Image (cartoon, rainbow, N blue to C red):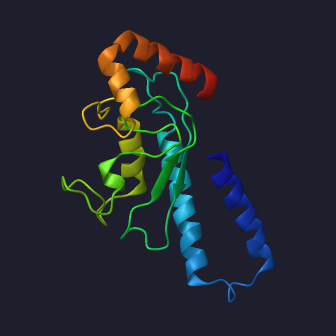
Amino acid sequence: MLTLASKLKRDDGLKGSRTSATMSDSTRRVSVRDKLLVKEVADLEANLPYEGYYQGGKFQFETEVPDAYNMVPPKVKCLTRIWHPNITETGEICLSLLREHSIDGTGWAPTRTLKDVVWGLNSLFTDLLNFDDPLNIEAAEHHLRDKEDFRNKVDDYIKRYAR
C-alpha cells in the first residue's frame, strides 16, 4: 500500500495550494476514505498467511473504492501472480463478499467494511481456500490430481512472484 500512502502525501501537498472552498465534497470523502483504508491495511499487514500452501508469500492487491461505497462493493484485483483455485493468474478474485448480488447471501451489504474485504482476502489463503467452486479451474484440477505437485507449483510461484 505504499502507493496509497504516497497518494495521500501528494494529496495533502495539493491541499495547501487549494482553498477549501474549491474542494468538492467528493474530494473530501475520497480523502477520508483513503485514510481509513490506509489505517485498516496497516492494521492487517501483520496478518500475512502463516499457514497452509501460501505461507511466507507477500501478495499485493489493488482496491478501487467507488464513489458509491459502501452501497456497492470495492473492486479488488490481485497484482501478484499466484497459483490459486480462487484467483486467476491475471488477478481476478472469486470472493462472494465482493459481489454486489450473491446467490448464497454472503455478498456485499452496506454494513460491510474494507476491513471485511481484507479479512476475506486473507481467508482465501487459509480457511476459505475452495477447490470445489474454483475460478481457476486448472489450479483446482491440479490439486485434485497431485497435491504434492500443486504445493510445489505454489511454492515456485511464491519464490518467483511473492517475495
Q: Residue furthest bottom?
A: 21
Q: Is residue 38 above or below residue 153?
A: below
Residue at image point 36% right, 44% down: 120
Examine the rendering and report whether any part of residue 74 can be seen: yes
Q: Residue furthest right?
A: 17
Answer with left or right where residue 118 lies relative to residue 30.
left
Residue 29 is situated, as x and y percent measured from the top left of the image, at 54, 74
Answer with left or right where residue 49 lies relative to residue 15.
left
**Quadrant where the image shows the C terminus:** top right
Residue at image point 60% right, 19% down: 159
Examine the rendering and report whether any part of residue 125 can be seen: no
Name which quarter of the figure residue 141 lies in: top left
Residue at image point 39% right, 21% down: 51
Residue 59 is situated, as x and y percent measured from the top left of the image, at 54, 35
Residue 95 is situated, as x and y percent measured from the top left of the image, at 34, 47
Residue 44 is situated, as x and y percent measured from the top left of the image, at 47, 41
